Amino acid sequence: MKQLLLIGAGHAHAFVLEAFANQTDHHIALTVVSDAATAAYSGSVPAWLAGESTLEETQIDIAALCQRANARLILSPAKTVNTQARYVILANGDRIDFDVASFNIGSTLKPPQQHGNRLPQLIAMRPLSTLHRRWQALQNDVNHLPSGGHQRVVGVGGGAAGCETLMSVLAQLRKQRPDIRWQGHLLSASNELLPGAGDLPRWLIQRALLRADISVHHQVRGEALVDGGVLTHCNVLIPADIVLWATGAVGHGWLADSALPLDKNGFIRVAKTLEVIDQPGIFASGDCAALTPTLPNAGVYAVRMGPPLADNLRHACHGETLNDWQPPKRVLALIGTGDGRAIASRGTFGLSGKWVWKWKKRIDARFIARFNPPFED
Ligand SMILES: Cc1cc2nc3c(=O)[nH]c(=O)nc-3n(C[C@H](O)[C@H](O)[C@H](O)COP(=O)(O)OP(=O)(O)OC[C@H]3O[C@@H](n4cnc5c(N)ncnc54)[C@H](O)[C@@H]3O)c2cc1C
């Protein structure tokens, strides 16, 4: 019996569990360690932030998926890994041994430094798995704001997640407290939004931000939270009441204490097979994996890696040859704009409209339903 350990229940591991549910393997004992029994599906996050869907509608039921795959689920996050002796230690102190292991633990971000005692309220957009707690806390606080006056919401980070979440959050806050005037500002370190996208999608996102009454500040890097706002890299204070921190993704800190090879952002370096460089029988996928050349941190790549990862994990358990995974050259990004519309972006191609938003919601609902089939007696 080979011990296969899945660390984290991200998008790619949902596919691995589905593959094992569809085809059991009596030579493999499957264990999943996760910090929660459900996992957020990234595609549904903007609709949830904008108040158009419930939290439940964004979650994959990992516990049920494990049951179907005949996998043991342990609800405690991994804290250390010993790649030589082949075990992980969990936060609850358990030691889990493995023959083959696979990491799909997503990413986090570097929070800003904070100096002062009248700081704006901060909501860090990563890690995604705990965003619902921070967003709920912010919405509760907003309920207690006095009527009238205005609030400045500053988004830091001009990538797709930064633009999309600022528009969605503002749309919801305006609905929640129409008696307050909400002003939006977006700080982008580069002089273009949506790095890697074509001119047309960039123009569409600029137009959407303008429509949402959000002022964009290009070449302004938010560095720290100070009394009254965000301090920029050139020591300018951008006044803020609420700050959404959506800067680039980085790897989870605890990986740095392991023998895993990491890139400069703290992600685990993998070969095309998704096997970790120089670590046979250990795999990584999704945001926490660094391929060469690197891929953007987007849920769509974690999703695409799922089925080939499932195959290679089986091959590794049986001592068979692994297959290379070929990342797609271009992927379609559907970016919600918080106003019942979305932008479709693929390479230089881009369009926007209400039907794009409906289309995105249909795709996302189908994805969730695939992993959460109705309960059968
Ligand atoms: C606000 C926001 C909006 C986004 N919107 C989109 C979008 O619309 N479309 C898109 O394609 N991408 C989007 N992204 C990017 C997307 O969220 C990520 O690229 C994607 O979630 C990565 O998937 P993953 O499977 O690698 O990890 P995740 O989906 O983050 O899953 C990782 C899992 O591992 C678990 N975990 C973490 N640490 C441990 C540990 N130590 N032990 C055990 N378990 C652990 C977590 O709880 C989580 O369940 C967005 C990102 C953000 C921050």
Image (spheres, rainbow, N blue to C red):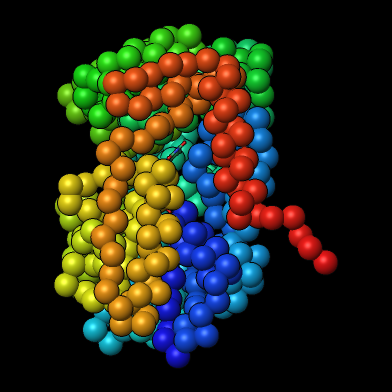
* Residue 190 seen from this side: yes
Work out whether 105 lies above or below 230.
below
Q: Position of residue 36 (x, y in %)?
A: 56, 62
Between 262 and 132, the residue placed more toward the observer is: 262
Q: Position of residue 65 (x, y in %)?
A: 61, 64
Between 111 and 28, the residue placed more toward the observer is: 28
Q: Residue at x 17, y 51 (%)?
A: 292
* Residue 126 seen from this side: no
How many numbered badges does the structure rendering display?
Answer: 0
Q: Position of residue 181 (x, y in %)?
A: 57, 12
Between 226 and 251, the residue placed more toward the observer is: 251
| Residue sitting farthest toward the right | 377
Work out whether 152 lies above or below 282.
above
Q: The N terminus is located in which quarter? A: bottom left
Work out whether 149 lies above or below 24.
above
> As drawn, is 144 to the left or to the right of 346?
right
Res. 37 image quadrant:
bottom right
Q: Residue at x 43, y 16 (%)?
A: 351
Q: Residue at x 44, y 71 (%)?
A: 6
Q: The C terminus is located in which quarter? A: bottom right
Q: Position of residue 328 (x, y in %)?
A: 31, 43
Q: Residue at x 41, y 10 (%)?
A: 207
Res. 49 image quadrant:
top right
> As drawn, is 120 to the left or to the right of 176?
left
